[in-house]
Image (tube, coloured by chain):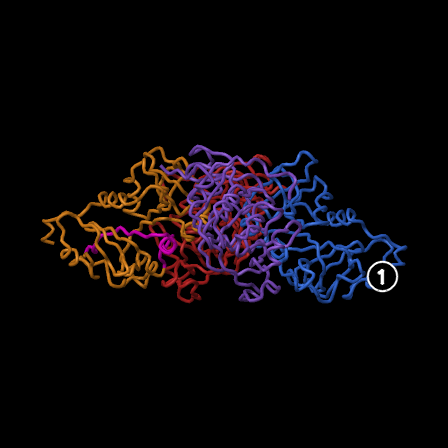
Chain colours: A red, B purple, C orange, D blue
Amino acid sequence: MIDKFVRSVAEAMAGIKDGATVLIAGFAQVGEPRALIDGLIEQGARDLVVVHNTAGRGREGVARLIGEGRVRKIVCSFARSRGSVIFEEVFARGDIELEILPQGTLAERIRAGAAGIPAFYTATGAGTKLAEGKEARQFDDREYILEHWIRGDVALIEAWRADRWGNLIYREAGRNFNPVMAAAAELTIVQTQHVAALGELSPEEIATPGVYVNRVVHIEAGDPPIKIE
Amino acid sequence: MIDKFVRSVAEAMAGIKDGATVLIAGFAQVGEPRALIDGLIEQGARDLVVVHNTAGRGREGVARLIGEGRVRKIVCSFARSRGSVIFEEVFARGDIELEILPQGTLAERIRAGAAGIPAFYTATGAGTKLAEGKEARQFDDREYILEHWIRGDVALIEAWRADRWGNLIYREAGRNFNPVMAAAAELTIVQTQHVAALGELSPEEIATPGVYVNRVVHIEAGDPPIKIE
Amino acid sequence: MSESANWKPLGREELAARVARDIPEGWSVNLGIGIPTLVGNYVPKEREVVFHSENGILGMGPAPPAGHENAWLVNASRQHVSLLPGGSFMSHSDSFALVRGGHLDLCVLGAFQVAENGDLANWARSENDNAPAIGGAMDLAAGAKRIWIVMEHTTRAGEPRLLRRCSYPLTAGGCVKRVYTELAVIDVTADGFRVIDMVPGLTLAALQDRTEAPLLG
Amino acid sequence: MSESANWKPLGREELAARVARDIPEGWSVNLGIGIPTLVGNYVPKEREVVFHSENGILGMGPAPPAGHENAWLVNASRQHVSLLPGGSFMSHSDSFALVRGGHLDLCVLGAFQVAENGDLANWARSENDNAPAIGGAMDLAAGAKRIWIVMEHTTRAGEPRLLRRCSYPLTAGGCVKRVYTELAVIDVTADGFRVIDMVPGLTLAALQDRTEAPLLG
């Protein structure tokens, strides 16, 4: 019997290695796998490359992971912003590398990793400062730049409902980076708000099929905060 | 009020020009917009480039469109196969161009068209006869070939349920090429088995949002045939 | 500015309403942070416009009243929103495929500078910002069918923002189709900026005084 | 072949059952047309394997009895199938992203020829087929984590199919990990073909007689 549920966050995080590339989903704290991020801090892996939409806000989650000196490099679309206080400190000390990407390029590079596409051309960023050092090429008289795939060793995912095959359904804007990151990592770890029996999730509605999922832990995290950090 | 419903197939097909590239969804007659294909035959546009998984089987649908001499070029993954009798005749006479693609490359090239990616690298077909004339490139010691986007002037789509915004839900294996083709054409025309009130389709389950859809016609086509041609 | 006695600049809300007037029914529209976000409030409910948010929402409705927020429903500006009947959710990758594939009829953005060839600068005020927050701006600027800009006509110091060439780092080249300021509505054409509307009492000469690039009347 | 008195080749069904024996629980598996399709029938129901079909099905179950087909549920071989609890549907583009992104643990395909370096030829018997039916074979061959081949050990004319180099056009290079024939199970290793199982009574020498490339015992 396929059963991807594990009993604890500690079990879910087992085996993550120093130097791993970790994709962390979530947008504005919605669909963010906070319990797994805390679990990663607890687990102890260092020298991580973290791929997340921001460089962390406030003092929890990705910000805390950075603050504890565990992130060698952050790949994100929002670095400096109101609330990115911990990143600012660490970055000012020169203790973290930064790769800044347009948000859609970030999403598409992860999608390319999931789909076996090592590189693709995009108009986003062409002719701008972000194109520096990137290969440019014309197609039909428009300039595009070459972007490469991003693949994770680990993806941390928050789902609304999950079954024992690892099939996932998300909730409203909690979907965001979750499906694409879940599909782009070697080891995909999920925290789910609810557990569904096999066959209970609609086959038409499953947003991430279990094939992409390795471990699921049941965490009743509750709603994201209404006051957004 | 947004209302993408039109009253007839003739109205749905209005304005399709000679020389148009037409994406036609469906796989093994499931999710195939047969009424729209018949409508296109009726409508009269000629010199078409048709993108479809096969070069037609039997004597109806895409096969009939080809048989009536309306297709200048067919882009497909299955050309010669049991049942491709009409294509064979026309191809033997030299009256149709053929571009043959691996099925996944076909789907991904259409997805690239939908996503604004003019070209991408793929391992599929690298080192084979189908790579001839295509740019090859190594990434991480593996060989890939460059494939270009496919965009349609028109897409013909079959949905299970549609609302007046053009939001679509498909049925089981009837999804196939429908969502990706719907997103990759300038003019996306849908035949739907059922009409839903606005707000009736689950926001989590909508597979094609109405943004991609231009015209919808209600056709109770019924089930695909159990005896497959 | 002494001649301002003759005319009155639009306020933030009036400016948002002015933009909203030009959005036709049926368009798919993304609204950037700031004044652009306010535009949605001025599209009459019976004129159906499909609002998109980069984090995977189509068919956004107005902000819910305080105390009635849905914690799971935030837009790309991290504000709580609602979903209209007909709305739907998608992943970030599907959402940006929609943006980058040219499926938005319009994106309304703020800007620091716009050049007469349509170049847009709205993400950095200096070449030296080494840790910027770009978000989806470059994807939207390069991907949407039309970019309309809402911004103040000049900087607080009175420096023009409508320029021959942008001095700040570009977001995307040649993407801006129209600029709305508190003083005027200006199209970007093959011949440069063309004024299509001004606040009552303002003269083209007075507007030109506040604009670096030449204005066509 | 006179020495066949000493051993009995596997029939189609036995061959399918032999392949099924080696598929562990939890794998995601795509089955090609022909004998590969039969493999699913021999995986015991209690050993959960997630079968994939290129046209967008995960979690396929067995063929329904005649008269109980679901018209909307066909696999990539255009046969009616069923969906297991836990199964799901996806688009062709998502389905092939799954294939091409390396998310299938196994794909079982038929073949015309396999070379000792793992090259596969299974779509054309001649360079001159100018209108072939390729379908998803090249995507599967290039994308799945493992390709296992099920084929007859020789052609009807007795020509070997396990070769030093394929003479037919390639489907993909170096992709085959294992070959199942009616006579033997043969792994493709860095050193070439290695026999890991043979039908009772068959000798390595007799198998080598039917094989162009050298076999390691």
The image quadrant where one finds the C terminus of chain D is bottom right
User: Residue D7: x and y, percent?
Assistant: 87, 54
Letter of the chain that mark 1 sits on in the rendering: D
Q: Position of residue C172 (x, y in %)?
A: 34, 59
**Res. D121 in view:** yes
Q: Image point 27% across, 40% down: which residue?
A: C42
**What percent of the width, then of the height, locates residue B218?**
48, 36
Q: Indicate yes or no whether the magenta region holds residue C13.
A: no
Residue depicted at 34% across the width and 33% down the height: C67
Mark 1 Cα shell of 10 Å, populated few (<14), some (14-19), many (≥20): few
Magenta stretch containing residue C136, yes or no?
A: yes
> With B186 as the anchor, is B53 left or right in this view?
right
**Looking at the picture, how far across and down is residue C39, in whole percent?**
29, 43
Q: Which quadrant is home to the N terminus of chain D?
A: bottom right
Q: Which residue is mark 1?
A: D206
Is residue D140 in view from this perspective?
A: no
Q: Please name whichever residue, D97 or B221, is drawn nearer the observer in this view of the structure.
A: B221
* Count of numbered badges drawn on the protein: 1
Query: In front: D98, or D11?
Result: D11
Q: Is C145 situated left or right of D121 in this image?
A: left
Residue type indicated by callout 1: Ala
- Secondary structure, mark 1, is helix
Magenta-highlighted residues:
C131-156
**Front residue of B208 and C59:** B208
